Amino acid sequence: MLTYRSASARLNAAEKPPSFMPSWSGMFVVNAFVVAWVLVVGFGLGGWASVANFIKQIDTFGLFAKCYQCPPKAHIPAAAGSPLLAPPHH
């Protein structure tokens, strides 16, 4: 759009507009629509979806882990015969 903004540039253009849209004004409208579409849909909705997904992940997992480099919790052996304290079977 910047290349063909002057009348002399459009007149001396190596590539003319396609046959289904013979005017440069129509080409500018189509180009402006594509630029607006990319800005609104691409950046606008894409950015909104990324932020919404990021917020959902923070709500699910939290922003930070509860404790970094904490010693592992000691394993408490199950009491003999107690099914409530028995380790899970894999």
Image (cartoon, rainbow, N blue to C red):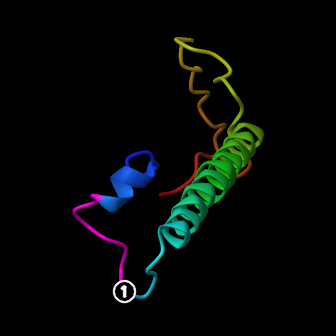
Q: Position of residue 12 (x, y in %)?
A: 27, 58
Q: Secondary structure at mark 1?
A: loop
Q: Quadrant of residue 70?
A: top right
* One can see residue 82 in this view: no
Magenta span includes 73:
no
Front position in the image: 18 or 75? 18
- Residue lying farthest to the left in this orientation: 14
Side of 65 where 60 appears, left or right: right
Q: Position of residue 62 (x, y in %)?
A: 72, 32
Compared with residue 66, is residue 62 higher up or lower down, i.e. above or below? below
Q: Position of residue 44 (x, y in %)?
A: 68, 50
Residue that appears at 69% across and 27% down:
63
Residue that appears at 53% across and 62% down:
28
Q: Quadrant of residue 22?
A: bottom left
Give, as a three-letter code, the residue at label 1: Ser
Q: Position of residue 87 (x, y in %)?
A: 58, 46
Magenta span includes 16:
yes
* One can see residue 45 in this view: yes
Compared with residue 78, is residue 2 higher up or lower down, i.e. above or below? below
Residue that appears at 63% across and 37% down:
78
Q: Quadrant of residue 45?
A: bottom right
Q: Which residue is mark 1?
A: 19
Magenta segment boundaries in residue numbering: 12-18
Residue that appears at 46% across and 82% down:
21
* Circle 1 Cα neighbour tier, 10 Å, few/some/many (<14 / 14–19 / ≥20): few
- Residue lying farthest to the right in this orientation: 59
